[in-house]
Image (cartoon, rainbow, N blue to C red):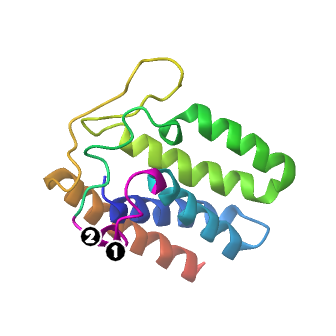
C-alpha cells in the first residue's frame, strides 16, 4: 500500500483507541503513527522521491518479499522488548505496526506473517491501484469522524 494509506489507517486506529488511553495521549498518537509507517523503512524511504507521504510511488511492488520487518514474528519480539523497557509505548507500537502488516497482507506480494515459516498471505489490492485509493478515501473519512468524536467528547 501507499504510505498515505498506511498513515490514514494509523490515524484511524489511534483516534479509535485514544479515548481509552489514560496516559499521555500525544505519545500514544505519535507512536501509533510512527509504527504504522515503520515497516516500510526497508523499502525505499532512502530514495528522495519517496519522502512525500502523498507520493504515488508504491513502496511495495518489489519490496518486503522476505523481509523480517514485514512479519508478525519481528513485531512480537520488538513489542516484548518495548514492553520490558518502555511499557507505555508497547500498545501503541503494536497497534500501528500490526495494522500496517494486516493491510499489506492484502497486496499481491503479501507478507510472510510468521517468519521463518514460508507461508505467505496475499491478496489482490495493488499499491497505488483503484482499491488502494478507495481505501485511502475511506480511511480519511473515518479519520475525520473519529477526530470529531474525540474533540466533541
Residue 95 at x, y percent in the picture? 59, 51
**What residue is drawn where x is 56% and y is 34%?**
72
Q: Is residue 97 above or below residue 109?
A: below
Q: Main secondary structure of the magenta part?
A: loop
Judge whether 63 appears above or below 114 on screen. Answer: below
Nearest to the observer: residue 45 or residue 74: 45
Residue depicted at 42% across the width and 32% down the height: 66
Camera-side residue of 125 and 147: 125
153 up-or-down from 3: above or below: below
Q: Residue at x 49, y 75 (%)?
A: 147
Q: Residue at x 29, y 71 (%)?
A: 49
Most extreme residue toward the front, as rendered? 47
What's drawn in magenta, residue-wise? 41-56
Q: Is residue 113 rendered magenta in the image?
A: no
| The label number, if any, that marks residue 84 in the structure image | none
Q: Residue furthest bottom?
A: 151
Residue 93 quadrant: bottom right
Instruction: Judge by depth and name the residue closer to the eye, 33 or 111.
Output: 111
Cβ atoms under marks 1 and 2 closer than 8 Å:
yes
Marks 1/2: CA–CA distance: 5 Å
The secondary structure type at the circle numbered 2 is loop
- Quadrant location, the C terminus: bottom right
Q: How far across and how far down the image is residue 114, in percent?
A: 53, 25
| Residue highlighted by disc 1 | 52
Q: Percent x, y for residue 45?
A: 41, 62
Which residue in the protein does label 2 denote?
55
Amino acid at each position: 500500500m501507499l504510505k498515505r494509506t498506511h498513515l490514514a489507517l494509523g490515524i484511524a486506529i489511534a483516534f479509535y483507541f485514544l479515548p481509552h488511553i489514560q496516559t499521555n495521549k500525544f505519545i500514544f498518537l505519535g507512536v501509533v503513527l510512527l509504527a504504522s509507517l515503520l515497516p516500510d523503512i526497508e523499502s525505499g524511504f532512502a530514495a528522495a522521491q519517496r519522502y512525500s507521504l502523498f507520493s504515488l510511488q508504491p513502496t511495495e511492488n518489489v519490496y518486503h518479499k522476505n523481509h523480517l520487518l514485514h512479519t508478525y514474528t519481528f513485531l512480537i519480539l520488538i513489542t516484548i522488548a518495548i514492553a520490558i523497557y518502555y511499557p507505555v509505548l508497547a500498545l501503541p507500537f503494536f497497534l500501528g505496526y500490526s495494522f500496517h502488516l494486516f493491510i499489506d497482507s492484502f497486496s499481491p506480494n503479501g507478507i510472510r506473517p510468521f517468519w521463518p515459516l514460508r507461508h505467505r498471505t496475499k491478496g489482490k489490492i495493488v499499491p497505488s491501484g483503484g482499491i488502494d485509493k478507495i481505501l485511502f478515501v475511506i480511511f480519511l473519512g473515518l479519520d475525520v469522524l473519529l477526530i470529531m468524536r474525540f474533540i466533541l467528547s
